[in-house]
Image (cartoon, helix red, strand yellow):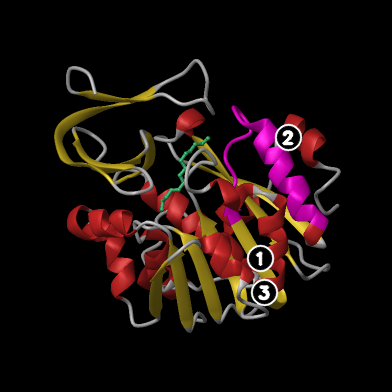
């Protein structure tokens, strides 16, 4: 923080910085795992910052939370039981419980401090935890995954970046564990960084995913307060015939209205998988033709 501005400096986006003008620091503490800040910003609502990195702001969080939830949910023909790993602010839970076919949601977040911070300062996101479909566990998502077999239809990994508590959620072993935790036909969707500054990471995740899933895809969404304004999603399916671009579930306008979706819709779903040529060239060995 300098002169009322928070600046996000990180190794994953070298030579650039994103800054937010701050009215007030609402929380500044350290959990056992990381530093946790909540800022009341001048133009972007409240911002959650973990280890100095912007996780979400009130201004654009809906884009990320809707897309990491509805891309996999609407690619699955019948997503009854969903596992969320990470997502301690509650925003992904808030979105997943909206899907009318989802009956049960289990969430595993490693840091109670993030949940507490969100419950106190980010009620628009933490409201996700209060839904009757939800069960929240505070424990290590990687370890949890190793103990569950053929249990979930969809697994969503809403992690921070791979420097810190979320590192284990980016390795090949994690994709292997997710595969065994899925029911037949299951789908995974992980926070997939950005091709603009982390192509090496994107390439590794997509290639690791393709080693364990017969169908792998990469999609992206616009999130102005993340570095480069973009974030990706790595998706894998146990169904070799799936076409991720073609949603299994298309909501009626009444359903859309009821779910209060602000970013996700059928056209956005299809467009999210359209990759620029340089990305297509790099990832095509691992993506389904
Ligand atoms: N529920 C919201 C949590 C957000 N999780 C993803 C945060 C990613 C932050 N870093 C983005 C950097 C992109 N290279």
Where does the image place residue 184, in percent across and percent down from the top left? Answer: 74, 79
Q: Is residue 283 left or right of residue 124?
A: right
Q: Is residue 239 above or below residue 21?
A: below
Dot 1 or dot 2, earlier in sequence: 1
Q: Are marks 1 and 2 in contact (CB under 8 Å)?
A: no
Say what secondary structure mark 2 lies in. helix
Q: Are marks 1 and 3 in contact (CB under 8 Å)?
A: yes
- The quadrant holding residue 203 is top right
Give the residue drawn at x 66%, y 57%. 174
Q: Which residues are magenta?
A: 190-211
Give the residue drawn at x 39%, y 56%. 262
Where does the image place residue 114, in percent across and percent down from the top left? Answer: 31, 54
Which quadrant: the N terminus? top left
Where does the image place residue 286, in percent across and percent down from the top left? Answer: 82, 47
- The quadrant holding residue 88 is bottom left
Q: Where does label 1 land, which residue? A: 178
Residue 260 circle label? none
Say what secondary structure mark 1 lies in. helix
Q: Where does label 3 land, which residue? A: 182
Does 208 appear in magenta? yes
Query: Residue 254 versus residue 152: which sits nearer the camera?
Result: 152
Say what secondary structure mark 3 lies in. strand
Query: Residue 255 versus residue 209: which sits nearer the camera?
Result: 209
């Amino acid at each position: 923080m300098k002169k009322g501005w928070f600046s996000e400096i990180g190794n994953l986006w070298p030579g650039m910085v994103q800054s937010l003008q701050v009215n007030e620091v609402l929380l500044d503490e350290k959990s056992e795992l990381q530093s946790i800040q909540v800022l009341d910003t001048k133009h972007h609502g409240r911002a959650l910052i973990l280890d100095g990195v912007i996780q979400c702001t009130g201004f654009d969080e809906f884009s990320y939370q809707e897309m990491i939830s509805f891309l996999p949910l609407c690619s699955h023909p019948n997503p009854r039981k969903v596992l969320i790993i990470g997502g301690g602010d509650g925003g992904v839970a808030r979105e997943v419980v909206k899907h009318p076919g989802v009956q049960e949601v289990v969430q595993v977040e490693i840091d109670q401090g993030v949940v507490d911070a969100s419950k106190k300062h980010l009620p628009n996101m933490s409201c996700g935890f209060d839904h009757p479909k939800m069960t929240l566990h505070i424990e290590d998502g990687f370890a949890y995954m190793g103990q569950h077999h053929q249990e979930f239809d969809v697994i969503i990994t809403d992690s921070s970046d791979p420097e810190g508590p979320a590192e284990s959620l980016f390795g090949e072993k994690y994709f292997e564990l997710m595969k065994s935790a899925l029911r037949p036909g299951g789908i995974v969707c992980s926070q997939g960084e950005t091709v603009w500054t982390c192509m090496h990471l994107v390439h590794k995740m997509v290639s690791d995913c393709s080693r364990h899933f017969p169908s792998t895809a990469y999609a992206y969404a616009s999130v102005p307060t993340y570095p480069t304004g973009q974030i990706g999603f790595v998706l894998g399916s146990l169904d070799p015939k799936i076409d991720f671009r073609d949603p299994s579930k298309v909501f009626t306008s009444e359903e859309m209205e009821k779910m209060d979706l602000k970013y996700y819709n059928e056209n956005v779903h299809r467009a999210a998988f359209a990759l620029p040529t340089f990305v297509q060239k790099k990832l095509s060995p691992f993506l389904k033709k």
